[in-house]
Image: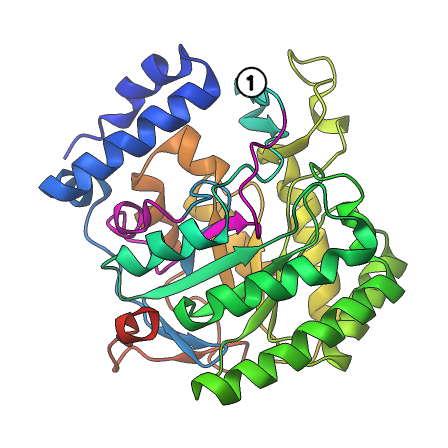
Amino acid sequence: MIDPYPLARPLLFALDPERAHELTLATIDAAACTGALRALAGAAVDDPVEVMGLKFANRVGLAAGLDKNGAHVDAFAAMGFGFVEVGTVTPRAQPGNPRPRLFRLPRAKALINRMGFNNDGVDAFVRNVRGARYDGVLGLNIGKNADTPIERASDDYLHCLERVYPHASYVTVNVSSPNTKNLRELQGADALDAMLGALRERQQRLADTHARYVPLALKIAPDLDDAQIEAIAARLRAHSIDAVIATNTTVSRDAVAGLAHADEAGGLSGAPVFERSNSVIRALRALLPAGYPIIGVGGVMSGADARAKLDAGATLVQIYTGLIYRGPSLVRQCALATKRSRPRSDNSSDLSSSPPSNSSSERS
């Protein structure tokens, strides 16, 4: 089947980026309902793997940010992702930063966004997630409201964790967006120690209450030096956090200097962050115990890029900006490129003889 996305992309790129995003979400919802989206993306790659005690259909997932309100889970699932992550969600609804706040850099295959956790709040988010029919692994990504003082950030994360826990396969703690003032301060050793301790204690209490353990993942920035990465790795171990997601967007502009929009404030994603993300992954792999799950994200624009994440030490891979530049067919390409591509002694177990688990009852 001929991929129509290269024909549609110029039309979408002629629109304001945020308007194009909204139109695309509406379009994929409709296409998923008719089955056209599944046909466009191609057959889902069956490559089951167990990570964090969860059974993933394949190693390639949707990164948080494309579906902040969890309102399009079924549409993204129809693209053949092995897992889907939605959010970031905050306790209360907030509009995010003023528009324009999303910019394309086509020559660099990149985006700059300063969205600022725009979302409808955790109660609406949970309603959307509960209404989804998807029965695969679903990650729910949580953050803090912009007007919550940084010294009270843990309150927001704990509130969100309480609300999303019964409906999540795993929960991601986002402390690495550059678009909420002072948020990245939470990656500092003392602040991270306090937050992870509080979240871990609440996670254990919720596991007892719901008779179900939901793993926690921490999402970190690419703009960290060796000492910061080492400090984060130490705290992941100390608090028994289940996984780390490397990485979020970068504030560096070295790779896009001189391009239109390169000086816009916000996080840069896409091809320019690929190597920096891989560097963080390699550093984490050297610092963390064998078998510790690392989810690699940043600049995956091809199957070869996805494979490179695994070669750097990642266990699973996520896509965001690549989907905008390459379209739904990228998911299958990446899933094929990463299929059974690592020794079974690494961060995961090969479950090729076992079907993915049905977790729909966990989100009821």
Q: Position of residue 202 (x, y in %)?
A: 63, 78
Q: How was this image coloured?
A: rainbow
Q: Position of residue 43 (x, y in %)?
A: 19, 52
Residue drawn at (50%, 43%), measured in percent from left and top?
A: 65
**Residues rendered magenta in the picture:** 70-97
Q: Secondary structure at mark 1?
A: helix
Look at the image and say whether residue 360 sits in the magenta stretch. no
Q: Nearer the viewer, residue 174 or 287?
A: 174
Q: Tell me the kind of residue under disc 1.
A: Arg
Look at the image and say whether residue 88 sits in the magenta stretch. yes
Which residue matches tag 1? 107
Residue drawn at (26%, 65%), measured in percent from left and top?
A: 46
Residue drawn at (69%, 36%), measured in percent from left and top?
A: 179
- Can residue 314 be seen by looking at this rendering? no
Q: How many discs appear?
A: 1
Dividing the picture into quadrants, the one containing residue 12 is: top left
Quarter of the figure that contains the C terminus: bottom left
Q: Is residue 268 left or right of residue 336?
A: right
Dividing the picture into quadrants, the one containing residue 212 is: bottom left
In the image, residue 22 above or below residue 173: above
View extreme (left): residue? 34
Residue drawn at (39%, 62%), measured in percent from left and top?
A: 138
- Can residue 132 be seen by looking at this rendering? yes
Callout 1 crowding tier (Cα within 10 Å): few <14, some 14–19, many ≥20? few
Q: Is residue 245 left or right of residue 287?
A: left
Q: Is residue 276 left or right of residue 49?
A: right
Q: Nearer the viewer, residue 87 or 328?
A: 87
Q: Nearer the viewer, residue 278 or 320?
A: 320
Q: Position of residue 11 (x, y in %)?
A: 32, 13
